Amino acid sequence: MYEFVQIDPASHADEIAHVWWKAYDPHKPEEDTRKWLEEPQVVGTVFGAKTDGRLAAVVGLTKQLDNAIRGANLSFGGISGVATLPEHRRQRLVRGAFEQLFAYANQENIIYSALAPFDYPFYEKFGYAHAELRHRYTFHRRAIKPIKAPAGITFREYDPVQDAAGVMEVQRSMARFGSRVFQPLWKLQNTDTQHRYVLEQAGEIVGYVHFEFSEPAQWELNMKVNHTWFKYDHVLPALVDLVARFAEQAEEVQWTVGPEVPLEYYIKNPGHEKRTREGEMMVRVIKWREFCQQIRVPLFASEPVVIGLQDENCPWNNGVFQLTPVSGRLEVETTDKPAEIQFNAVQLSSAIGGLLTANRLLRLGALQCGPDAAERFTRIFPPDSYISYVGF
């Protein structure tokens, strides 16, 4: 028999780490896995299953991550550390833990949620849909075009004490390109050994980037570029110039960017680089009415649409709702009108997550409704470039 429990990770760290070690890192020392729990704000609370007094499965939840989801800083929950001891798998323990988690999230007014999946169909069962798109470009160090940084922009090594707040502002500015989940301030204040640089103009921090180097073979270095953040568009060429200078030390460059960085423009021979899809995050709404009331919608959205929602994991979301866009906000009310679009939880997550739209789902045969209703819903929820700077 299994008992489903909610536990504090601080007082049950050894038990949780043991499950993670068996599920994720059986080839490493168990104490290496436990170190992950020692970082602040990694996991706020854990839901799991016990048998004979021992933990058999866990699902972690981190609350209150700073974000900008469709123009709003929502009460947000990051799901992580989903694991079951191998000998207890196939007992629907994770499903039971998620039932607990969703009920808790509803009670705590957590509106939106995201996770990094090990298997997409597995998490679709809980109403999550793929939402993130990034690419990793791999190319030779001399593939970058010669770029002259704009006058007045300088760069220097990042100081985690004096620069963290300024870099946080730069990071938040990236929400102008779409929905974002931000790295917390404590992460930016880490005094690690990454090669981190800020760009400045007139005394203001306007850009941030960090590099990592690895040595795959003798006398060769590979360079990884992450977090290409720029407060103003004219700063991007200076970031590319800085990367090109460091790339001279490497044989190969791997640069991961979102769609807001047109990296092909800065490569000498576009099409010769290797491009790999990187974005993996899945999202779902936990409290539908509150989500609608808090987000911003495009001003060009003006016509209402009536939708039905059947959400077996979060049944408090069930009902028929009229969505009415008014001056960039969204009014939501239950109605007796017939639904023009009927969603289940995965369909809704897909239609609002950003990668797909109701129009696109209709054309793919994944949604049953009229084209006019799909168009009105798409005008309320157009494509959105969702990116999480935090890994769960």
Image: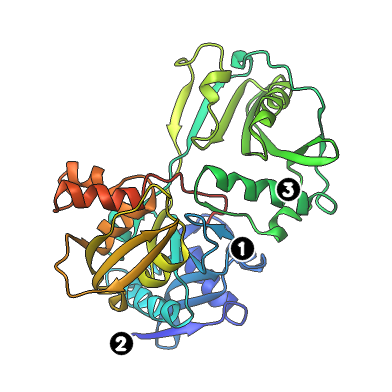
> Residue 67 lies in what quarter of the image?
bottom right
Q: Is residue 250 left or right of residue 118?
A: right
Q: CA distance from mark 1 to mark 2?
A: 30 Å
Say which element carries label 2.
loop
Amino acid type indicated by mark 1: Trp
Rendered location of residue 392, percent (x, y):
52, 58
Q: Is residue 99 above or below residue 328?
A: below
Q: CA distance from mark 2 to mark 3?
A: 50 Å
Amino acid type indicated by mark 3: Val
Q: Local crowd at mark 2 within 10 Å, few (<14), some, or many (≥20)?
A: few
In the rendered structure, find residue 167 and report the number of the disc placed on it: 3
Name the residue carrying label 2: 1
The residue shown at (47%, 66%) is 294
Quarter of the image that includes the N terminus = bottom left
In the rendered structure, find residue 36 and report the number of the disc placed on it: 1
Mark 1 vs mark 2, foreground winner is: 1
Compare residues 320 and 153 and report the one nearer the observer: 320
Amino acid type indicated by mark 2: Met
Q: Earlier in the sequence, mark 1 or mark 2?
A: 2
The residue shown at (38%, 44%) is 383
Compare residues 167 and 221 and report the one nearer the observer: 167
Q: Earlier in the sequence, mark 2 or mark 3?
A: 2
Rendered location of residue 201, percent (x, y):
81, 34
